[in-house]
Image: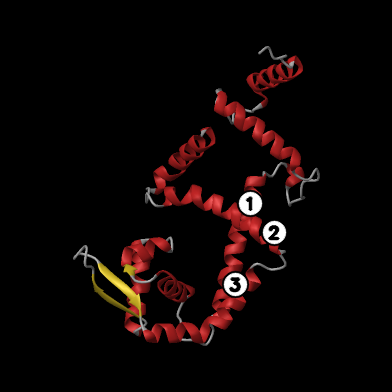
Amino acid sequence: MYMCMNYEIVKEVIRLVEQFDTGISTGSYPKDVNGFKRWIYDNEKQKALPADEPLWEGKAHGRSPESVISTLLVHMNRYAKTYSRAAIHNSDFTTQEDFIYLINLRAFGAMTKMDLIKKNIQDKPTGMQIIGRLIKKGWVAQTNSETDKRSKVISITQAGLESLDRQMDKIRQATTIVTGNLLYAEKMELIRLLGKLNDFHHPIFSQHMESSDLLNKATYSLSKNQQT
């Protein structure tokens, strides 16, 4: 069956290909079909964003959005830590990591020491120090792993559960304060965006790269991620 072709659509596609090929993509996309599709998708998504970009300190002098995001994430981490310290004030907890480790054990069950340390995105010496402190307080117990005799499996004890429960109201209060005046829909969008960032950074962090190699390898990962 003969079908009439819509030449206006063909012309529009050719025009877009010409724009893409002449550098409008600013070099951020691979020069292939996948790059072309991603470029179109990002352009259309950008059009759906509010026309008025937010203002930020230094914007008029060329400060990049990446710089602002990085700074705000650092600030939010400091705010969260401050509220966490307030939540354990005058309690038996030494640091916020103490109750975070216990919360993970209660939520996910017994696990090896290294699994718990990895779940909390910490280096081994720091993690072992926290676990040792929890063992000394009697809040976690360790047993030999049934699958790997070289590993120790740790679990939360009744004393650990009771200590956690005594502090949970203040811990929940602190986490609520951290999200501030965000609406529910904004919280859901923030979870999505932070999850996307975490999915990018976690595999890089898990490789335990030397500081001398980290930036170059992370930049390569970013470039590779943009091409897929």
Looking at marks 1 and 2 on the same chain, the residue that comes earlier in the sequence is marked by 1
144 above or below 93?
A: above
Q: Amino acid at mark 2?
A: Glu
82 above or below 215?
A: below
Task: Name the residue: 43% across, 40% down.
Answer: 217
Q: Quadrant of the rendered structure where residue 40 is?
A: top right
User: Percent from the top left, x then y, of residue 221?
Assistant: 47, 39
Alpha carbon of mark 2 to alpha carbon of mark 3: how far? 16 Å
Q: Is residue 78 left or right of residue 137?
A: right
Task: Name the residue: 38% across, 48% down.
Answer: 209
Q: In the rendering, which numbered label is found on residue 69?
A: 1
Q: According to the image, label 2 marks what residue?
A: 186
Alpha carbon of mark 1 to alpha carbon of mark 2: how far? 16 Å
Which mark lies nearer to you, 3 or 1? 3
User: Percent from the top left, x then y, of residue 115?
Assistant: 35, 63
Q: Is residue 1 left or right of residue 206?
A: right
* Marks 1 & 2, CB-CB < 8 Å contact: no
Q: Secondary structure at mark 2?
A: helix
